Image: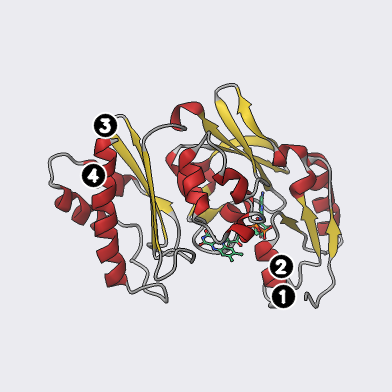
Amino acid sequence: MISINFEYHRPHSISEALEMFGELHAKGKEPIFYNGGTEIITMMRIHSLYTEARAVIDIKTIPECTYTGFQGDRLVIGSSIPLAQLQEMPEFPLLGKTCSRIADHTSREKITIGGNICGTIKYKEAVLPLLLTDCDLVIAGDNGINEIPIQQVFDKHMLLAPGSFVVQVLVKKQFLDLPYVSKKMTRIDRIGYPLLTVSALKTGEQARFAFSGLCDFPFRSNSVEDALNNQDWSVQERITNAISQLPAPLLGDAEGSAAYREFVLRNVLEESIAELKGG
Ligand SMILES: Cc1cc2nc3c(=O)[nH]c(=O)nc-3n(C[C@H](O)[C@H](O)[C@H](O)COP(=O)(O)OP(=O)(O)OC[C@H]3O[C@@H](n4cnc5c(N)ncnc54)[C@H](O)[C@@H]3O)c2cc1C
């Protein structure tokens, strides 16, 4: 049960959503965009964060947000597409595999790709394939509707101006069927928050790597990749050097200590490098 009152709005176009946001904001309502609702409803139930929001704008009825398909040389994924649908989408197997390990199937029917990458929970595992493929995000806001490289708007978390929302993800075809690995390690069960998740993609002789659960935020790092691709070193030396280049300390929390994470990371990286070499 949700014990607070809030307004629910359902715009049918991007411009209507932006106008609604402006009007509600002017009335002091502190509106937020609503997608799968899993995080928003949880936060409302526990009376944190969203209790003062008073108004939600559901973007799932905006056609661009529910579109998937090819346009020119890019795959377009609407931000309201649920993870369960992405899991079944053969066009982008790395994204499908990564999404298939987020939450349980019932939750994946609700959780959207937009909500996963824009939400407050630190894992945001669906962002890893997007970082690896240099995707563009279509973002609607006060400055209109713009395509922006993900590296410009994702640094530890999404950097969106107030009143902006992610409409679509655009991925170039050339990245969709490259050899990849996606490995999620959890503390006990198959379903759960990650001890660590590693996604990697082989582009020519180089491999790209992105991580969730390892530090306090998901990331892809040039220095980590440089170390892991350095052919002058043994695989073990590459991994040791990559660990010394991590952008933040290894997490130690309920999922596992920092030392245990490092132990698992070494094994997962060794396996991933071997698999990509054969791929
Ligand atoms: C049981 C369960 C287990 C989970 N396990 C994991 C896990 O292991 N790993 C993991 O990464 N995640 C996991 N999640 C998912 C995560 O915790 C969030 O619940 C989920 O990602 C939110 O997605 P949503 O579509 O429901 O977003 P909403 O609840 O609709 O929105 C979440 C936030 O994102 C904003 N937002 C949503 N869409 C957009 C958009 N298009 N543009 C701008 N802002 C937007 C909203 O304003 C809100 O602030 C789990 C969730 C559940 C319920």
Give the CA distance from mark 4 to mark 2.
Answer: 42 Å
Q: Is residue 140 left or right of residue 74?
A: right
Label 3 CB less than 8 angstroms from ligand 1: no
For disc 1, the marked residue is 45
Image quadrant in which the C terminus is located: top left
Is the residue marked by circle 4 packed among few (<14), some (14-19), or many (20+) residues within 10 Å?
few
In this view of the protein, which residue sits in the foreground, 19 or 138? 138
Give residue 264's quadrant in the image. Answer: bottom left
Q: Mark 4 or 2 closer to N-term?
A: 2
Give the CA distance from mark 3 to mark 2.
Answer: 45 Å
Q: Mark 4 or 3 closer to N-term?
A: 3
For disc 4, the marked residue is 274
Image quadrant in which the N terminus is located: bottom right
The tag on residue 205 is: 3
Label 2 CB less than 8 angstroms from ligand 1: yes
Look at the image and name its color scheme.
Answer: secondary structure
For the residues bearing labels 2 and 1, Cβ distance under 8 angstroms = yes
Give the CA distance from mark 4 to mark 3.
Answer: 13 Å
